[in-house]
Image (cartoon, rainbow, N blue to C red):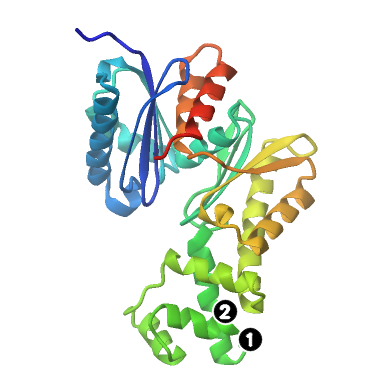
């Protein structure tokens, strides 16, 4: 006989990996699950639907509960940037057969709640791409998520590095190690052969080049430092833009840092981002996210489900989160 365990489901879907966490109503973790990407802009909406179905089924199987036991769900997915995206996803969410309240938000919101469980403040995502979001408890704002006037994470970092070494090749910028090392990382010892391959679309640089750029910046390469500084400064400016629209300027504000660029330990990126945020918002309290954003999706869901959100729920969940490997 099945004894009903009421559960809350949080799902965080990004460009490469998707996580699910089921918790009970006290914030105790019942199960976790993981699979591949869930950004519909990259893999298509039907593929995301299939992925989410597998993920939900896996989490339920491990927890030994049924879909009827889930009282609320938050899907925090990359690519949910505009109102029409939410409309597009409704058939997918309906097909999952979850009877409880369902929330659909951008994945940046999960990171915000993971680092600021009251949901108040700003989050800067600098990963494969970039996204900045914030909430004052009544209004939630996000940057546009399509490289429209905002920091673009590792993608922007790589594009700027390519532009930098192209200018070196033209003789309009000084030559540094970046000019040799970036083509070499793509398999070319001759920069001109590398540029030819890029121009003819035989080579496409991706985010995997980002660690090399960070390494060169940390070692003092001036071109790499300039690139890293530009990206970090833009991400800091994005935080200021969201914070100023939410009237946080002059008030204490939590700023959560999340994503690969924020957690890579690049001293140039870290110092530039933090000093710029502090210069623009001197009351900012900046912290790097220490738990997976999916736990923020669970906390966001709890905020939506409970009439009064319990800080004990968040404490239980986050304490358990630090002991769980996803």
Tell me if mark 2 has few (under 14), some (14-19) or many (20+) residues whose alpha carbon lies within 10 angstroms of its own.
many
Label 1 element class:
loop
Residue 91 appears in view: no
Query: Is 21 situated left or right of 313 in this image?
Result: left
Q: Report the front residue among 26 and 298.
A: 26
Asked whether the beta carbons under mark 1 and mark 2 sit within 8 Å of each other, the answer is yes
Alpha carbons under labels 1 and 2: distance apart: 7 Å
Q: Quadrant of residue 315?
A: top right
- The spot of residue 46 in percent (x, y) is 23, 43
Query: Is 141 situated left or right of 323 in this image?
Result: right
- The spot of residue 178 in percent (x, y) is 56, 80
Q: Quadrant of the N terminus?
A: top left
Q: Report the front residue among 24 and 279.
A: 24
Q: Relative to 136, does residue 167 appear above or below in the rendering?
A: below
Query: Is 190 situated left or right of 137 in this image?
Result: left
Q: Quadrant of residue 190?
A: bottom left
Q: Residue at x 58, y 36 (%)?
A: 115
Q: Report the front residue among 323 and 162.
A: 323
Picture disc at residue 164: 2
Label 2 element class:
helix
The mark nearer the N terminus, 1 or 2, is 2
Picture disc at residue 280: none
Q: Residue at x 34, y 51 (%)?
A: 41
Q: Quadrant of the C terminus?
A: top left
Query: Is 280 situated left or right of 99 in this image?
Result: right
Tell me if mark 1 has few (under 14), some (14-19) or many (20+) residues whose alpha carbon lies within 10 angstroms of its own.
few
Picture disc at residue 173: 1
Residue 47 appears in view: yes
Number of marks in picture: 2
């Amino acid at each position: 006989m099945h004894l009903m365990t009421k559960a809350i489901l949080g799902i965080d879907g990004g460009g490469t990996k998707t996580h699910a966490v089921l918790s009970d109503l006290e914030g105790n973790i019942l199960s976790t699950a993981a699979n591949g990407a869930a950004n519909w802009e990259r893999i298509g909406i039907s593929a995301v639907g299939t992925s989410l179905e597998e993920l939900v089924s896996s989490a339920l199987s491990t927890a030994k509960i049924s879909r009827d036991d889930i009282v609320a769900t938050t899907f925090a997915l990359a690519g949910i940037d505009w109102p029409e995206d939410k409309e597009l996803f409704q058939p997918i969410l309906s097909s999952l057969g979850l009877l409880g309240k369902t929330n659909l938000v951008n994945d940046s919101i999960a990171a915000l709640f993971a680092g600021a469980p009251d949901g108040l403040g700003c989050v800067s995502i600098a990963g494969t791409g970039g996204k900045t979001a914030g909430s004052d408890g009544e209004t939630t704002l996000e940057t546009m998520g399509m490289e429209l006037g905002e920091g673009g994470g590792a993608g922007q970092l790589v594009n700027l590095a390519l532009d930098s070494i192209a200018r070196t090749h033209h003789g309009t910028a000084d030559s540094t190690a970046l000019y040799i090392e970036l083509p070499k990382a793509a398999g070319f010892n001759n920069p001109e052969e590398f540029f030819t391959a890029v121009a003819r679309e035989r080579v496409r640089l991706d985010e995997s080049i980002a660690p090399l750029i960070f390494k060169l910046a940390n070692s003092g390469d001036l071109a790499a430092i300039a690139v890293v500084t530009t990206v970090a400064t833009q991400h800091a400016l994005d935080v200021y833009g969201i914070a100023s629209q939410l009237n946080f300027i002059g008030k204490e504000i939590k700023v959560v840092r999340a994503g690969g660029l924020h957690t890579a330990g690049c001293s140039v990126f870290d110092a530039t981002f933090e000093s710029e945020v502090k210069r623009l918002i001197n009351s900012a309290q900046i912290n790097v996210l220490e738990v997976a954003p999916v736990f923020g999706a669970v906390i966001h869901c709890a905020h939506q489900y409970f009439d009064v959100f319990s800080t004990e729920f968040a404490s239980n969940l986050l304490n358990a989160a630090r002991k769980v490997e996803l």
